[in-house]
Amino acid sequence: MVNSQRANPQKVHLQSLIDTHEQAFVVIDSEYRIVAANRRYCEAYGISTEAIAGQHCYKVSHHADRPCHENGELCPHLALFKQGEAVEVLHTHFHAGDQPERTRIRGHRLQGTDGELYLGEQMFPLEAEAGSVCDAMQMIGRSPAFLSCVDKLARVAESEASILLFGESGVGKELAARFIHARSSHRNGSFIVINCAAVPENLFESELFGHERGAFSGSSGQKKGLFELADNGTLFLDEVGEIPLNLQAKLLRVLETGEFRRVGGTHTLTANVRLVSATNRRLLDEVDAKRFRLDLYYRVAGIDVTLPPLRERAEDLPELAAYLLKRLAGNQGSCRLDASAIAALQAYEFPGNVRELRNLLQKAVLNCREGVISATDLQLPASAPPAAQTADAAPLQPEAPQSLLAAERAHIQGLLDAHQGHRARVAAALGITERTLYRKLKQYGLGR
């Protein structure tokens, strides 16, 4: 229990300070007990300002029975009272109703009127208040790699710079783009998506900028383009590396001036658009290969963010899989993973990332019995090849085991089939250059 004769004068003094903060703010003593908290903090965690004093901080914010550093997290309390440092960390907190929220916590060194040391914690939620249920529920994870990425997404969203999202296929680049949109000054506008790889080259300009009636054969009426529809909102250029080279100059001009004309039109239109792009190809390699303009690269990559692959987020798999299973099971009842299934997933490389995880679970739901999914039900490949190789100049290893070579050959063949033989996309999925891919194709007799 807090000594009321000592704590109450302190509480009054500290309370007057923390009530000036717009963000949630809490003051904690050396025994992890909350001395004072402002109204925003109390509302977030569903506790009255009268009942908050004396509660353990980890119980309130983490719904845990022990301090967060004992669960492997970086702890501002430990840093201050053991090392004398005020640090900033990323945690997943649980609000009223067990709703998770990723939060940036900034620690402050505070000293009471009696000279006693206290920890002040200022909270910065990474989810936007304007964010949708999609943002809160699907961006699931608490691993260091994931939290660091979400923190950077939240920071860059507040700027007006163009954002380039880089990541392997299936990591959730569109979801990240929606997260940025929800936190940006353009959040009240539309979020418009164009998959640059899915639009035929002869229709790309019309799709992006619109057309007037009679502009070309078959254009029976006026059509607004996606750039125009994204006015005061966000335009998401997915697979931006696939934009036809002959149209990149037109796009560059529009991005620089905000002005454009519909195909067949004479009137100049304007649009205020926040640009977010995504690619699984290294665009500077595309620039070197003369397939992407350098000036356009600098325009779309004002700030770049790399999304971590699933193999770097193994600790997120139980929670992420549970969420996906809840959606996939539907009317078939609930399904869960047993210990063997979780261990198998955490040992797997996931070349297809979250998209592959969903597909594996979808099959497992049909294979399992009594709602329990085992490692056998997952039907994971017996030998998964490395998901990415970046040493382009490294020679192929003829001394590698034949089973591994066979697995790599099968994996490359699968990617060739999935991308209809598009070698640039296959190379990007493997994390290698096309030059290295050509050597592998020659070695395995593929792609002929």
Image (cartoon, grey):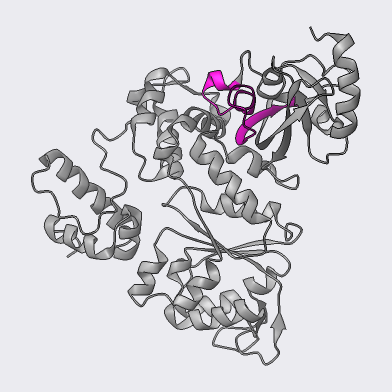
Stretch in magenta: 68-96
Residue 177 placed where, x, y %?
Answer: 59, 55
Residue 309 placed where, x, y %?
Answer: 43, 44
> Which of 102 and 66 lies nearest the eye of the viewer?
66
- Could one spot residue 324 in this view of the protein? yes
Furthest residue to the front? 115
Quadrant of image for the N terminus: top right
Name the residue rendered at 55%, 88% in the picture. 216
Residue 98 placed where, x, y %?
Answer: 69, 25
What number of labels is visible? Answer: 0
Name the residue rendered at 41%, 52% in the picture. 168
In the figure, residue 48 lies in which quadrant? top right
Name the residue rendered at 45%, 29% in the picture. 365
Residue 49 placed where, x, y %?
Answer: 87, 23
Q: Seen in the image, is 292 located left or right of residue 427?
A: right
Say above or below: 313 vs 367. Answer: below
Say above or below: 284 vs 129. Answer: below
In the figure, residue 89 lies in which quadrant? top right
Q: Is residue 125 magenta?
A: no
- Could one spot residue 422 in this view of the protein? no
In the figure, residue 23 lies in which quadrant? top right
Name the residue rendered at 43%, 40% in the picture. 310
